[in-house]
Image (cartoon, rainbow, N blue to C red):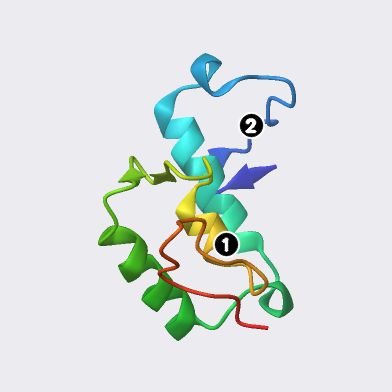
Amino acid sequence: MQTEGRPLKKPCVRCLLSELDEDEIRAGLLEYIRNVPADRRVSGEIYQSRLAQCRSCERLLDGMCLECGCYVEIRALRPEADCASAVKRWHSAI
């Protein structure tokens, strides 16, 4: 099986982030985001608005929220999710 001209690697189910290559981590996260079904994600407009709020937050570090430890690009996809900060930058879409 191949993805975009390169062999598809089997994910390491029991690996910690420290055991993975940074490019593999990033690629895995982006693939996960691409594969979230449309009925389980917010609209593109809401998603971009949420990410803009995350970008302006001092608690964002390397794509992760320091309040809850999530990857903001994944949390922001979820319709039922709220910003984890005490000062809510965005709210649930449902």
Toward which corner of the image does residue 41 lie, by quadrant?
Answer: bottom right
* 33 and 4: which is toward the camera: 33
Quadrant housing residue 40? bottom right
Query: Which residue in the protein does label 2 denote?
Result: 9
Q: For label 2, count other residues whose C-alpha is less than 10 Å away and answer few (under 14), some (14-19) or many (20+).
A: few
Disc 1: CA contacts within 10 A as few (<14), some (14-19) or many (>=20):
few
Quadrant (top left/top right/bottom left/bottom right) for the N terminus: top right
Circle 1: residue type:
Arg
Residue at image coords 38%, 66%: 51
* Number of marks in picture: 2
Instruction: Describe residue 93's horizontal placement relative to residue 37 as left or right.
Output: left
Question: Residue 19: image x %, image y %?
Answer: 54, 14
Nearest to the eye among marks 1 and 2: give it. 1
- In which quadrant of the rendered image does the C terminus lie? bottom right
Q: Using the numbered discs, state the Cα–Cα distance from disc 1 to disc 2 in whole angstroms.
A: 17 Å
Please name whichever residue, 20 or 71, is drawn nearer the observer in this view of the structure: 71
The percent coordinates of residue 84 (x first, y second) are: 52, 56
- Residue 35 position in % (x across, y down): 65, 61
As drawn, the residue found furthest toward the front would be 86
Identify the element where label 2 is drawn.
loop
- Residue 92 vs 74, above or below: the answer is below
Can residue 84 be seen here? The reply is yes
Compared to residue 30, the image places residue 83 above or below, namely: below
Name the residue type under label 2: Lys
The residue pinned by badge 1 equals 34
Comparing 23 with 88, the one in front is 88
x and y, in percent, of residue 79 in the image:
64, 74
Q: Against 7, is 14 above or below?
A: above
